[in-house]
Structures are given as structure tokens and as C-alpha cells.
Image: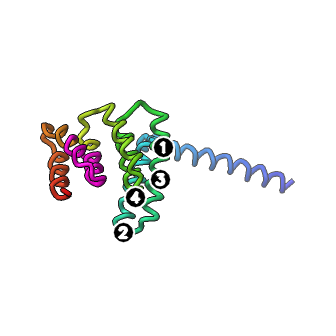
Amino acid sequence: MKNITSAILIFFLLIVFTANSNANSNKFRDELPELQRLTDLSIAIRRINKGLKYEAKGKDKKANKMYTEAIDFLFEANKNQDIDPSIFFYLGFSFQKLKDFENAEIYYQLGLAIDPINSNINKYLGALYVNLKKLKLANERLDVLKNCNCEEYLDLKNFISENKF
């Protein structure tokens, strides 16, 4: 009889303490800010930033892994959200970092098809053309940026003048 009474008492105490702890945790949960799920695009941008950090430290293998992962997330982002030139910009950037210049050019051009005066895409595509020794095409990108009154114009202009063949 003692065992049954003590078992009932323990069971009762467990119920009281469990209910009380849930009440306390719910109170704190209401005070937390609403958390948002990271998008595939934001995850890709984080991977690219990690890749840049690894690259700065000379850890090219890890950097390339981050750029490859970013590309996977960017493809998912492209499937799951509206067409966005920034997705194509980051795809071009990631492919360029992986030295896949053909795909980099394709994705930069896709971004420009949506937003022809996008200063970042024009700048990086122009720089890609300079590296590929396509100066005429690089100057076309510079002409697009001429009236933007932006830093990208000056960056590309300086890059072209420093790398004339």
C-alpha cells in the first residue's frame, strides 16, 4: 500500500512540475522575436562570403567548396522564387571564382537580360571580359555604366586601364 501511495504522489508531483515548467517556457517563448527561415539565396550569399574568407587565407580548396555549395543553393533559389537578377549575379560570380568563365558569362548575361543597367553585373562582366582579353566587350560594359554616377563605373574604368594589352 505504501508503494502505491508513493507512486501516486510521485506521479502527481511530476504532473505539477511538468505543467509549471511548460507554463514558464511559454511565457519566455512569447518574448522571443519571430525567427525567419533563411532563404536559399541568403544561404548562398553566406557560402560565398565564407569562400572569400577562405580564399583570402589561401585555402583555395575550402573556398572552391563554398562556391560550389553556393551554386547549388542559387539553383534552388532560382527554382523557388521569382526571377531575380541578383541570383544570376551570384551565379556568375561563383562560377567566375571557380574559373568556369563560360558559365560565369552566361549567368551575368542572364542577369543583364532582366536588368540591363545593373551596375554590379555590368562591372563584373566587364572585368571578366578584361581577364579574357575581350577589351571591346569590356568597354561596352563601361559605356553602359557611364551615366550611372556610381563607384562600379570608376572601378571598371580603372581595371580596364590597368590591364590594357
Type of amino acid under label 2:
Lys
Q: Which percent across, then down, holds residue 88?
A: 38, 40
Question: Could you tell me how far apart the alpha carbons at marks 2 and 4 are, in whole angstroms?
Answer: 11 Å
Tell me the residue that label 4 is attached to: 50
Q: Which percent across, then down, holds residue 78?
A: 45, 36
| Mark 3 or 4, closer to the camera | 3
Label 3 secondary element: helix
Q: Residue at x 84, y 56 (%)?
A: 2
Type of amino acid under label 4:
Lys
Q: Which mark is residue 29?
A: 1
> Which of pointers 1 and 3 lies earlier in the amino acid sequence?
1
Question: Could you tell me how far apart the alpha carbons at marks 2 and 3 are, in whole angstroms?
Answer: 18 Å
Type of amino acid under label 3:
Thr
Type of amino acid under label 1:
Arg
Q: Quadrant of residue 150?
A: top left
> Which of pointers 3 and 4 lies earlier in the amino acid sequence?
4
Tell me the residue that label 3 is attached to: 68
- Whether residue 119 sits left or right of residue 38 in the image: it is left
Find out whether the residues at labels 1 and 4 contact each other: C-beta distance under 8 Å: no
Label 4 secondary element: helix
Tell me the residue that label 2 is attached to: 57
| Mark 1 or 2, closer to the camera | 2
Q: Residue at x 44, y 59 (%)?
A: 64
Q: Report the predominant secondary structure element of the magenta stretch.
A: helix
Magenta segment, which residues?
A: 123-140
Find out whether the residues at labels 1 and 3 contact each other: C-beta distance under 8 Å: no
